[in-house]
Amino acid sequence: MKDNANLLRRKDAATPRGVGVMAPFFVARAENSELWDVEGRRYIDFAGGIAVLNTGHRHPRVVEAVRAQLDAFTHTAYQIVPYESYVALAERLNQLVPGSHPKKTTFFSTGAEAVENAVKIARAATGRSGVIAFTGAFHGRTMMGMALTGKVVPYKTGFGPFPGEVFHVPFPMSLHGVSVEDSLKALQYLFKADIEPKRVAAIIIEPVQGEGGFYVAPPELMRALRKVCDEHGILLIADEIQTGFGRTGRWFAMNHHDVAPDLMTLAKSLAGGFPLSAVTGRADVMDAPAPGALGGTYAGSPMAIAAAHAVLDVMQEEKLVERGERLGAQLRERLLALKTRQPRMAEVRGLGAMLAVEFCQPGGNTPDPDFTQQVRARALERGLMLLTCGVHANVIRFLFPLTIPDAVFAEALTLIEGALTA
């Protein structure tokens, strides 16, 4: 029988340390919200492959769709020989993505690719080069993705210089004294000190920051950004790679707002574990790049496209958006109750099922990453997988499948309580 210790030794000998691995075990099989390692131990998965598994591990509908596609064809490169399923999925996303304007969609393989191409599209459409992002943002590990990302360790350390004409302004964080007014003042100061608005192609923002700590963009910030973009001809890009497909209690986090983005990046739970990403946006903006300027060998893989169609079907038929809202409310209630017993729980925040807890030293807002790691480790020892995040690595985020059975969810809540109060 295979054992984790031997596999870890082989991993360390064969793969670079730059690929950080959280779990000290190797998966053998998985089903919905649970997985089992090579030694047979069971874990409840509240990591979801980093927000990829809103429909759970191996949803039968997704597996069936991929098997059917496997029997038809596996690859042609869409730019060489197109296929109807790609077009049909673009049509579905054009209808789902917020905004009443006509839209178009193009597909890629990873979230970072979607971000890179959103910037390319914005620059082509505006004839400008500047891009503004936010502190704490995460937009990928490619060179442009790292430039846009507002967290140095571990993503940017040792990899510079990065592409130019990228600027950052503070993201609102009430716990740490950063208000919406502070963010907007910083934006206006940026226009005076670093780059004039007419040279800015886009402002990119996560409606709820993912790796940055699950900070929620207030509605007044989103309205103000929309106004600034409209005033100066700047495009607003919503990065919904982690927030999309029911995670926040809506199809997309931008559905919580009364303004729409010009472009939206999508990935992660779009295809239920298969590599697929998308950029959806205003039709006139999406048509700015010339033929051949967008694409990729594996962009819009037939297997992943088939999986994505099944994911959208499952989300609608099983009402996973509504279920995510309900499960998120249960988790929030449990966490708030625990907050009275654990003084290091500084804040419980998020939208829908996209929730997190930030841990600080008791009585203040000094980050406590050591205690955060203790909570994650204690949960893992008990059979519950949790992820940390935040610029200071002092936030625990909860990314359970929206398909998780009620009994397993209840079991996980008990494990969370034990990890927080041990």
Image (tube, rainbow, N blue to C red):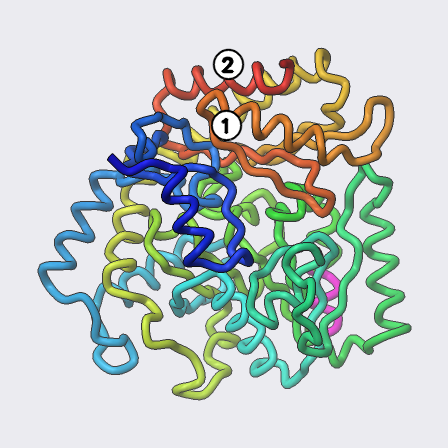
Q: Position of residue 193 (x, y in %)?
A: 90, 73
**Viewer-side residue, 47 vs 175:** 47
Is 76 located above or below residue 211 in the figure?
A: below
Q: Which residues are magenta?
A: 226-233
Residue placed under numbered mark 1 in the picture: 380
Q: Position of residue 89 (x, y in %)?
A: 31, 60
The residue at the point 62 percent across, 56 percent down is 138
Q: CA distance from mark 2 to mark 1?
A: 13 Å
Q: Which mark is residue 414?
A: 2
Question: Residue 230, located in which quarter of the rendered image?
Answer: bottom right
Q: Secondary structure at mark 2?
A: helix
In the rendered structure, which amino acid carries the disc numbered 1?
A: Leu
Q: Is disc 1 placed on a helix, strand or loop? A: helix
Could you tell me which residue is drawn at 55 percent across and 58 percent down? 18
Relative to the observer, which residue lies in front, 227 or 211?
211
Looking at the image, which residue is at 33% across and 36% down?
3
Is residue 80 visible in the rendered image? The answer is yes
Reply above or below: 337 against 169.
Answer: above
Q: Is 135 placed above or below 54 here?
A: below
Residue at horizontal 69%, vertical 73%? 160
Q: Is residue 27 left or right of residue 357?
A: left
Residue furthest left as drawn? 71
Q: Does 231 appear in magenta?
A: yes
Classify residue 154 as left or right of residue 231.
left
